Amino acid sequence: MKSYSFMMNQNTGRNLRVALVGFGLGGESFHAPLIAATPGMTLATIVTSNEERVRRAGRTYPRVRIIASVKSLWEQAADHDIVVITTPNRYHAALALDALAAGLPVVVDKPFARSSAEALRVIQFAREKGLPVIPYHNRRWDSEYLTLRRVIDAGTLGRIFRFESRFERWRPQLKGGWRERGESDEAGGLLYDLGTHLIDQALALFGPVKQVYAELDLRRPGAQTDDDVFVALTHVNGVRSHLWASVVAAHFGPRMRVLGEHGAFVKQDADPQEAALRSGKIPVGPDWGVESPDAWGFVTDGTRKHSVRSEPGAYQNFYAGIAAMLRGAAPPPVLPEDAVAGLQIIEAAQRSVAEHRVMALNSES
């Protein structure tokens, strides 16, 4: 991976001031609580023009300045140390460019951009400005991902053959909103949404990919975007990753199943942090992200099976890493080039579907 240098904030005498652009589900549940709970960080400004979101933000964060436009934010750039972009996908790259032009480092929610070419333009501009731009790939701090990483590093499974990973939901009715719009500029659908996380985890675990195959389906009546997704990756090292994302799964498969030469690792349940954040809990204290033993996964050699203690999920570590980076004490927690690699796989998956040919059998022969 390429790297780049940038100017870092060396002022350790005050908290780092964060501006959050967007206060929908992502901003309210997956960014604001983590920022507010990070030592050395202050959620200084929230940008939203939605009246109900303004009220909710004001109730939860009464000391935070709430403004209606990003134009006002850029005019107040000197009052901030970093900007977090969590808006509809079509605005991600444009707002990142604006933040960089205003002289501010930026965190961009997934997907980092609508295309790999758009992402590369953002990265190039960040290099020119000498500023960091970081993808928000928080699922690298999922409990099951951290646990699997520990199991693999210990050599328990030996050489890995296949990695299976799923994010499945049961939402048989359309909800409306931009994520379900079919226009390509929206970058909606599950491949860009949950697929970004699945692909990033596979890349982080098993490295570059040489082949991609995909099935992208629209299952629900009236659906305009993919809501049932399968992507198969062949990594350069020979591991095959089979990835599923669906909102029409009335029964869930295992969150992860990993097959190796010495055995298998299976984890049925997903990390508890998403549900906790959606319910309004704050990511602090020793119990955050901790799973009860009945939710742990297991390793089996085909004969014997034993439970594997789950690593605590730790989304808070992403912003702790951002704070350390800004103070010059650590590299970025996620590299922007990693987002480019994921977007290239998304584009390859879309081409796989577009170019797929079904060979029909002649039933009369």
Image (spheres, rainbow, N blue to C red):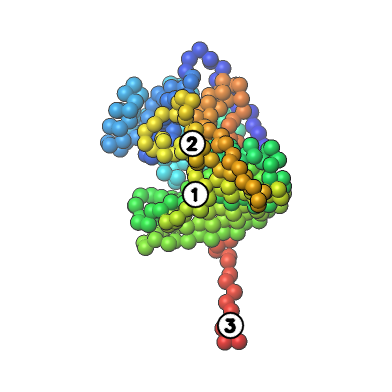
Position above or below: 243 against 131: below
Report the Cα–Cα distance between label 2 and label 1.
Answer: 20 Å
Which residue corresponds to mark 2?
292
What residue is shown with label 1?
A: 167
The residue lying at 40 percent from left, 53 percent from top is 170
Give the percent coordinates (x, y) of residue 7: 59, 24
Residue 184 visible in the shown view: no
Q: Quadrant of the C terminus?
A: bottom right
Q: Of marks 3 and 1, which one's residue comes earlier in the chain?
A: 1
* Left or right position of 70 against 144: left
Residue wearing tag 3: 362
Q: CA distance from mark 3 to mark 1?
A: 37 Å
Q: Nearer the viewer, residue 49 or 209?
A: 209
Q: Secondary structure at mark 3?
A: loop
| Disc on the earlier residue, 3 or 2 | 2
* Camera-nearest label, 3 or 1: 1
